[in-house]
Amino acid sequence: MPEVEPNDSRDTAPLISGRQFSIEAGSMGTDVDCFGVRAAAGDSLVAYTHDGNGACPTDRRGPANTLITVVDSVLTVVAQNDDAIGHGRCSRIDGPTLGTGFVLPAAGDYRVCVSSGGGANIERYVLSVLLLP
């Protein structure tokens, strides 16, 4: 699914329905792209950036550096990742075992925000999000 503006802040993030989605976005620089998810009690979250083909996206300097931040409904940061171990400069929010998910602290609305870890433009990236019961 393509990105729809405005989604540049935690307040304007569209709430995405469903428990699994991928969104194609880009041109970050100082831009922030936020997307909302609604979690049930006990849900876990997996969120990661990639190029759509299993690798990290690139910018003019090579592998792009993304940063994922997850905030709750009162804008408290509950999770953040810059460079995921084993995923180069891509970002990944996950559990202690790959694919198990980061356990969200409570039921409610969360915002998953992606920004450039180095401030460079990333022409295209994909954010994939999965909520696990």
Image: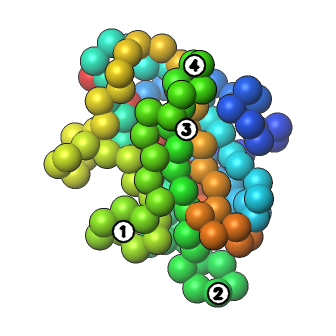
Q: Quadrant of residue 79 in the image?
A: top left
User: Which colour assignment does the render follow?
Assistant: rainbow
**Is residue 43 positioned above or below 64 on the image?**
above
**Which residue carries the number 1 mark?**
87
As measured in the structure, the alpha-carbon distance from the residue carrying label 2 to the one carrying label 1 is 17 Å
Please name the amino acid that badge 1 sits on.
Answer: His
- Dot 1: what SS? loop
Q: Residue at x 70, y 67 (%)?
A: 119
Q: Provide residue 69's location: percent of width, then percent of height.
A: 53, 44
The quadrant of the rendering that contains the C terminus is top left
Q: Provide residue 120's location: percent of width, then percent of height.
A: 71, 72
Q: Residue at x 54, y 56 (%)?
A: 67
As measured in the structure, the alpha-carbon distance from the residue carrying label 3 to the one carrying label 1 is 18 Å
Visible residue check, residue 83:
yes
**Which residue carries the number 2 mark?**
61
Visible residue check, residue 17:
no
**Which residue carries the number 3 mark?**
112
The numbered mark, 2 or 4, whose residue comes first in the sequence reads: 2
Specify whether 42 is left or right of 66. Answer: left
The numbered mark, 3 or 1, whose residue comes first in the sequence reads: 1
Q: Provide residue 35's location: percent of width, then percent of height.
A: 62, 35
- Dot 4: what SS? loop
Q: Nearer the viewer, mark 2 or mark 4?
A: 4
As measured in the structure, the alpha-carbon distance from the residue carrying label 4 to the one carrying label 3 is 11 Å
The numbered mark, 2 or 1, whose residue comes first in the sequence reads: 2
Specify whether 107 is left or right of 70. Answer: left
**Which residue carries the number 4 mark?**
73
Please name the amino acid that badge 3 sits on.
Answer: Val
